[in-house]
């Protein structure tokens, strides 16, 4: 239990109910076009408990060959669907000086899914912030410092919460320790969706 790293902006309930419903509906169309896939760890081929998809020009994938961003869905071979305007608008509102986001990673958690402590460092640039939107069931989020040994803080992320990670927090270790099933009615079959918007390439 330590201080929150500098640059974390936590905006609880930033999206109201109707905005969450609208986004959830658009995501249904997106995952119909770009189905959720289960990534595996490059080191040992172990499957993630989280399933993923992406929208926007680039998408994050992980397979036996490594972690990377690519323009095509790993299963369908098709381009990722466009990023909803509401997400681009949120990025422009909260990060007015950052270049346009290129990737929106869609993480889907069922009741048992989790995400171990990690850093986000597969991008070519860490200058732009990362923007995260939580939808559906609540989750216990953990964030530490720039090394794995740094003390961590935990807090719940609820549906409609938005997190902006800029400055030093951009490279902070973080993860999802558990879900709280049944805490939201937004998603018909339960679970949690986290959207993470990122700039991947260096701006021109
Ligand atoms: C702190 N996702 O996709 S979102 C990820 O809830 C990821 O699915 C988690 O970590 C999730 O990489 C956490 C909040 C978040 C996203 C990116 C960060 C926190 C972050 C990047 C740097 C530091
Ligand atoms: Fe992450």
Image (cartoon, helix red, strand yellow):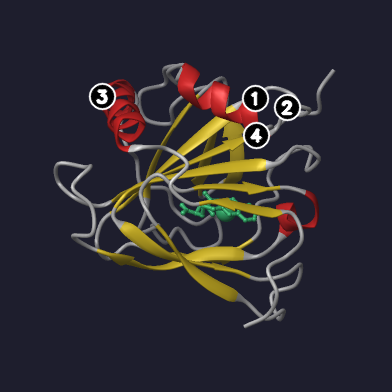
Q: Residue at left 66%, top 71%?
A: 144
Query: Mark 1, residues whose alpha carbon is within 10 Å: few (<14), some, or many (≥20)?
Result: some
Q: Are marks 3 and 1 in contact (CB under 8 Å)?
A: no
Badge 3 is on which residue?
Answer: 32
Badge 4 is on which residue?
Answer: 94
Badge 2 is on which residue?
Answer: 96
Mark 3 to mark 2: distance in Å?
A: 31 Å
Q: Are marks 3 and 4 in contact (CB under 8 Å)?
A: no
Where, by quadrant of the figure, is residue 92 drawn? top right
- Left or right of 192 in this view: 102: right
Q: Are marks 4 and 1 in contact (CB under 8 Å)?
A: yes
Badge 1 is on which residue?
Answer: 92
- Left or right of 126 in this view: 194: left
- Viewer-nearest of labels 3 and 2? 2
In this view, the residue farthest toward the right is: 204
- Viewer-nearest of labels 3 and 4? 4
Q: Residue at left 31%, top 20%?
A: 33
SS label for mark 4: helix
Judge: label 1 CB < 8 Å from ligand 1.
no
How far across and down, in percent of the image, does residue 182 sit? 18, 60
Query: Mark 4, residues whose alpha carbon is within 10 Å: few (<14), some, or many (≥20)?
Result: some
Q: Are marks 2 and 1 in contact (CB under 8 Å)?
A: yes
Which disc number belongs to residue 171? Answer: none
Q: Are marks 4 and 2 in contact (CB under 8 Å)?
A: yes
Instruction: Report the front residue among 57 and 138.
Output: 138
Instruction: Report the front residue among 149 and 187.
Output: 187
How far across and down, in percent of the image, does residue 55 sit? 46, 26
Give whichever of discs 3 and 2 has the lower sequence position.
3
- Left or right of 197 in this view: 149: right
């Amino acid at each position: 239990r330590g201080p929150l790293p500098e640059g974390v902006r936590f905006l609880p309930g930033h999206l109201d109910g109707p905005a969450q419903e609208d986004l959830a509906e658009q995501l249904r169309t997106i995952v119909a076009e770009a189905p959720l896939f289960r990534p595996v760890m490059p080191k040992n081929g172990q499957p993630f408990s989280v399933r993923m998809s992406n929208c926007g020009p680039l998408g994050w994938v992980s397979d036996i060959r490594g972690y990377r961003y690519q323009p095509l869905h790993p299963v369908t071979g098709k381009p990722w669907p466009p990023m909803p305007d509401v997400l681009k608008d949120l990025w422009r509102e909260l990060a007015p000086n950052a270049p346009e986001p290129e990737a929106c990673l869609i993480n889907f958690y069922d009741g048992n899914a989790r995400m171990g402590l990690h850093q986000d460092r597969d991008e070519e640039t860490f200058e732009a912030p990362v923007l995260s939107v939580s939808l559906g069931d609540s989750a216990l989020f953990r964030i530490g410092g720039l090394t794995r040994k740094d003390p961590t803080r935990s807090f719940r992320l609820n549906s409609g919460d938005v997190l902006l990670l800029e400055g030093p927090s951009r490279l902070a270790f973080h993860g999802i320790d558990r879900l709280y099933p049944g805490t939201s009615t937004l998603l018909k079959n339960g679970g949690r969706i986290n959207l993470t918007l990122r700039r991947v390439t260096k701006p021109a």
